[in-house]
Each structure stands twice: as structure tokens, then as C-alpha cells.
Image (tube, grey):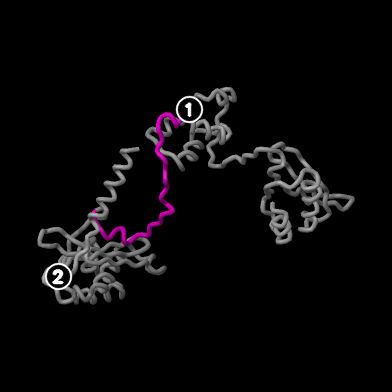
Amino acid sequence: TKESKKAFINIKQIIASNLERAQPDLSKPFILTTDASECGIGAILSQKGDDGKERMISAFSKALEPAQKNYATTDKELLAIVKSVDHFRHYLLGKEFLLRTDHIALTFLHTCKNPTTRMLRWALRLQEYQFKVEYLSGPKNMADSLSRLYTVSKVKSATPLEQTNKREIMEQYHTYLGHGSSNNMMFAISKRYKWPNMFKEIDQFCKSCLICQQEGFERLNTKNRPIITERDGQIWEIDLIGRIKSKQNYYFIFVAVDHHSKWVETQVLDEKTPKKIIEAIKRQIFEKHGKPECILTDCGKEFTAKEVADFLNRENV
């Protein structure tokens, strides 16, 4: 929509306008902003210009080592300070600067009655520097994003819908999910589409479905999706029954079910080796019904064996 495009352009402009970097001015005081999270530490070195606007000079971040991830929150904040001042040592040593961080960490360092050896080392290293401390809450801390690991895999795209398209989409998903519940439909549709009052409209649609009303029972809430086939023989499902007692030395029953028509084929087996499974697939499925597009199993060892996989690959199944 026009509104979403305009909002996207505004976001890009805001981001671009805040990415101003400046050259360090050694005659002006520096500002060091630090932060720590469960997985890393980060810092931003900045200065205020003649116009009073603060501009970034450089940034620093580092992932925590396995042992460091076990530190207490206070220790992680202290580690972020120590690593950051060491990283920007050539800018900060011998000059007073402003340190923006969680001041509770530094207060704890000075007031702790029984400091650990690690904390004593950190205290001695920080004594080299001259700085004033300013408390900065997490939401206002620019270094917060540098201390965290972000992944684009968590970003989900969603297509905004016009009012005329909503019912068509809901009808398609409701049929595809086998007249699934409101929660099922919400889970499936929200992966690709978004609109205001989405769950309310989906819930009303499900309650107004004539087939669902005729069935007269509550649909289960599950994230499973049905396997849809278009013709007989497209997908076969196979499994074994056994081990069973037999006087004729047949201890297993090979079962194959056509997913579309529910037609069943069976064959007795004396053992469940890959060779016997291949022979049963050929005899009960390929020779009687032709080659399917796909064969589904429960991933038993007899079905996932290399011989069976190579056979199905050669047959393009």
C-alpha cells in the first residue's frame, strides 16, 4: 500500500541520517558507551561536535567465550568496560572521558568486600584511566545492539492484504488444512499474510463454515499440515508389522498404503533386510501401480539403509 511504502522510505531515511561518523578530535573529550548481553559485549566511541550533536567515531563488539557466558550480569558489564577501554586505549589513556554504562557494575566493584582475583585485576586495569560515569538505561544504550547476535532468519516477511482478498485466502487455507481450527489457520496464514484484527476475522470465518457446523465437534489445535495429493499412486506410505510369531518362518508383514485412495498392499517377509524391502516395493507398488513420486516411511533402519536409498534414487523416487 502507499502508506506502507511511505513508512518504509521514512525508516530508511532515519537510519541513513543516524549513520554519521566523524574523525576523532583529540582536543575534545571522548564518550565511551558500553553494554553486555548473554552472548557478547559492545561499545561505541563518540564525541560531540561544535553543534552539540553527538557523532560516532568507532564501534567495538566481541562474542563472549563459553566460560564468560557463565559470568554474573555485573561481571559481564565490568568485562564490557575493561575490554572496551583496552580496545580504545590509544584514544582514552591520559585523557578524561565520559563512560556511559550500568553504573551499578562499577559501584559493585568499589564496594565489594570480598572481590575475586578477576575483579581485582579489572580494578587495577581501570585505575590507569580517568573517567566520569553516567548511567544509561538499556533502551537508550546505543551499544546494546552491538552486544547481541541478530539473525535475519528471525525476520519474517508478510504481505498486506486488501479487504477483497481476505476471504479468498481464508477459504483456501481452511480447505487446505482440512477445515482446521482458528489457531491452525492463524499459524499457517500469518507466515505469509498480515492484516488488522486478523485472528478475530479468522475465528468468525471458521465459526461461519457450514461444513464445520455440520460436523459438530471442536477441531484440535495443532501445527501439523495435511499431505495433499492430486491422484492415485502419487504418494505411498510403507511400514512393517512385527516381529510376530509364525509357524512358516514369516515374521514380518510389509504394508503399503496409497495416500490418495487408501488402497492397501501387503506382503509377508521372513526378515527385514534392505534387500527384502526393495523386493517388496518392486512387487507391491512398482509392478502393480507404477512408480510414485514419493514414498513415506517412519525412518526405520530398514528403510533408511543405503541400499534402499540408492535404489529409490535410481528409480527417481
Q: Position of residue 63 (x, y in %)?
A: 37, 66
Quick one: 17 or 303, which is closer to the camera? 17
Percent of width and height locating residue 80: 29, 67
Estimate the spatial distance between the alpha carbons at disc 1 and disc 2, rounded to whole Å.
Answer: 64 Å
Label placed on residue 77: none
Image height of 242 relative to 177, above or below: below
Quadrant location of residue 277?
bottom right
Say which residue label 1 marks.
Answer: 205
Screen quadrant of the N terminus? top left
Q: Which mark is residue 25?
A: 2
Taking the image as shown, residue 230 lies to the left or right of residue 109, namely right
- Above or below residue 33? Residue 2 is above
Q: Quadrant of residue 117?
A: bottom left
Q: Which residues are magenta?
A: 140-166
> x%, y% of residue 222?
54, 40
Q: What element does badge 2 sit on?
A: loop
- Reply yes or no: does residue 277 show up in magenta: no
Q: Are marks 1 and 2 in contact (CB under 8 Å)?
A: no
Magenta stretch: includes residue 145: yes
Q: Residues within 10 Å of mark 1 (few under 14, many from 20)?
A: some
Residue at 23 percent across and 54 percent down: it is 17
Q: Quadrant of residue 75?
A: bottom left
User: Judging from the image, what secondary structure is the residue with disc 1 in?
Assistant: helix
On screen, 82 above or below 228? Answer: below
**Residue name at image x 29 percent, y 42 percent:** 6
Left or right? Give the position of 246 relative to 101.
right
Which residue is at 35% across, 66% downward?
71
Front of the two marks 1 and 2:
2
